[in-house]
Amino acid sequence: MALTTSATGEASEFVRLVGPHLPGAYRLAGYLLRDASDAEDATQEALARAWLAWPKLRQTDSFGAWFDRIVANVCKDRLRQQRGVRALDLDEAADAAHELDPFRAALARDEAGRLVRRLPPDQQIVVALRFWRDLTLDEVAERLDLPLGTVKSRLHYAMRSLRRELDRQSTEVRR
Amino acid sequence: MRNHDDADFELEQRLRRIAANPQPEAPSSVYRRAADVARGELRGRANGVALVPVLRGGRRSGIRQAGALAGLAAALVVAVAAMGLLAGQHGPNPGSPGPVGGRWTGLEWHDITATASGGSGQDHPWWRYGPGGTGALKWRGGFAMFTTNEDVWTSEDGLSWVRSANTPGVFGLTTLRGDLLAQAEAGVWISTDAVDWRRIAVPFDPHLSVLASSPEVAVAAVQGAGLQPGPLRIYATRDSTVWEVASIPTNMAGAQFQGLEAFFGGFRVTGLVQDPNGTVKQTDADGVMRAYAERTWTSPDGLTWSSYEPKVPPGRSADELSYWGTAYGRLGAVSSTLRSSDGGATWVEDSRSPAATRGNAVVASDGDRIVMAVEGGARFYVSEGDGNWRMLDQGGDIGSLPYGGRPVLLPNGLLWVTNDGVYFGQGLSGVAPRGSLSPVTTPLPEPTVAVGSPVAECTRLPMRSEAAAELVKRGAVIVYERNGGISCVDALYAIYSDGRVVSDFGDGHPTSSQLPANKVTSLLDAITTTPDAANGWFTDGWYNTYHMPCAACYTYSLTVTYKGQTKTVTAVDGGTDAMPEYWIVTGYLAEVIPLPAESGCCGIPFASGSSAPSTTSSR
């Protein structure tokens, strides 16, 4: 079975480009989906999507942003699939059971992390890219293909919701 | 008192610290996937199988080449040309998006990826949402749908699609009296033309709500406020201005909201309520595991709601209807193998459903007809909800239809959305489609290859429960099967008390590896005492769950024999039904089971400096 040189070269180039982005993509998925197994699946799905769309990517220097966008969209799909279920207390109880999961454990360490999952998926993604992927707002906007203003407003709403809830909890504790 | 800036800064620091340490490493499977995905494509082509995607500058159909070369301008030309081809031809007029008379007998496929890509070449993978998941909306401008990346696309004919330029980040879309009603960034918006959007006042947080509509009424289901859980509330409007609060039953208000959908001309809400006999078991915040049952409430107008208690055949559960029997319309809905012809009051077995014999069906319905795709798109069936199914003739000039798409139903045809492109199947009535269609592209000559096939290009194989039972009989103390996913993994592992691990990836060549015997004992101890000794594997707390797996999801079966007891528990990932502890246990196994022998092969290099893990048997 003979493979063409160009075919092999394309595959090699794809793997060469995607390799350095996999750890970050996996972690982005992990913090968004709060589960290492889901993150693994999501990253793999993103890889498959990326490979399929790869022939259409012209600017390989933006590969990282492009791949992050795919990961974010895969995660958004999955978050929205879960969105109908608002078993909030259940999730919190499950944190204890998932202490072996590195992502869930990390998020459970701070109430702010626990609360992020209650945000709408689009806000969760902005928070994850901004603080857990450590990107600038411009970079977040680039990855999500959204206007900068939209990213700012989503982050604003997210932070406001988180702050209010944390304040409310703090007030209750003081009572 | 701190001001908001200080508080935000502190909150930002808290959020950053969460992910600062530790930084979980990507598992080896992720790296292998990179090579697998690429290798699968190469292998498929080398075997003469026409796989997608093409390499850069590679083969495309004429339509797609034009789109790739000339971008959006060419795409528009293509769309116009395609419309010209169809004008005056047989079948329904694609320029008339209203309900099509006559019963479909065929589909004539057109590659519309060019328009679906909007010139960027990257949009169509996000055509994953129609309202209700599988259907496009009918509105005054034709058809509309929103997509994963929060765009709204509209079309007058199903062939040529336009992205709405001014949409404010849509994550929900419905219609009201012909207008588009969008849940979007910072509110609910309405538009008569998909160009100008006007924000409307609503008495609820659009982020926390789900919208649905019958033609004359829009309904919002809202649970909680801010980040706080709370009772379920339902609002309904006829004019988008006045939203009335619906009167709902007490148990509905206290339910855990699951979904809101249009249903037989009205609406349906599903939710979970506590029920000692319920099949959904959850550990609540107080640490107590309780049983919940799914309940459904229906309303003809969005304002008056009552419990929905349909009659289902013996041995079947009304819970099944939540997956399938949703908005399948006034004709009589179907589940995969249930159907109703009396408005959903009574459901009967639909033994003639293609899903009953062919399995793995994907279904779309818009209320006028139900279309079922089986075998990844090799065959399409249509029904008007009367229990009769007709296989549709297929034709077109696209060569072959990619495997594993998702159907989005329009009144005059069907969209087949795949990762590689979008195809429009013109619905035909009484005439044969032009052009011949090659068999759906299949992933690999050998369907039993465990990994390495390209996405959505393989056939999910059935679980090997008989083989698993035989392994137990032969003394395996742990038998673990992981099946499915985008590469149709078919992995069956047997672990013996002496440490022997036999891995069968469905290629006819099981391999054997060795663990320390005491590792097996500790593994058994760990599995059977998760989450704790009192609630371990052999207790009633461990139970089977199942939902229809998505394309990327896996089905699992794990049989454990220990201290004189044997028990099998099955689950499917990608949902919320499986008990969380199941994934802890599979995590234990992932640490010790070998990887497929061919993984990481084929000379696909990893990036210099990336941490490509070893593929040795013990991770």
Image (cartoon, coloured by chain):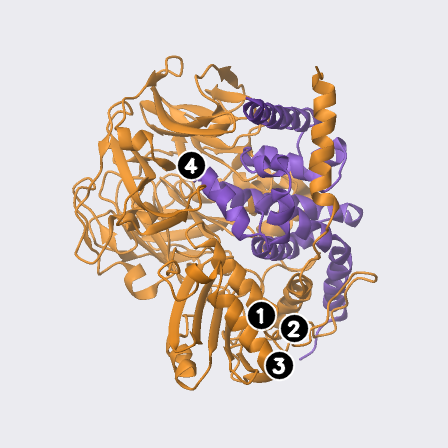
Chain colours: A purple, B orange
Residue B53's spot in the image, x, y percent?
Answer: 61, 59
Alpha-carbon span between mark 2 and mark 3? 24 Å
- The crowd level at tag 4 (other Cα within 10 Å; few <14, some 14-19, many 20+) is many
Residue A85's spot in the image, x, y percent?
Answer: 43, 40
- Left or right of B282: which side holds B4? right
**Residue closest to the eye, B514 or B564:** B564
Q: Amino acid at mark 3?
A: Pro
- Kindly check if marks 3 and 1 are in contact, taking CB atoms under 8 A apart as contact: no
Q: Do circles 4 and 2 both sit on a common chain?
A: yes
Q: Amino acid at mark 4?
A: Pro
Judging by the rendered image, the residue that carries numbered circle 3 is B516
Judging by the rendered image, the residue that carries numbered circle 1 is B451
Alpha-carbon span between mark 1 and mark 4? 33 Å
- The crowd level at tag 1 (other Cα within 10 Å; few <14, some 14-19, many 20+) is many
Chain identity of mark 1: B
Judging by the rendered image, the residue that carries numbered circle 2 is B599
Alpha-carbon span between mark 3 and mark 1? 27 Å
- Left or right of A38: which side holds B411? left
- Left or right of B290: which side holds A137? right
In the figure, residue A170 lies in which quadrant?
A: top right
- Kindly check if marks 2 and 1 are in contact, taking CB atoms under 8 A apart as contact: yes
Image quarter of the C terminus of chain B:
bottom right
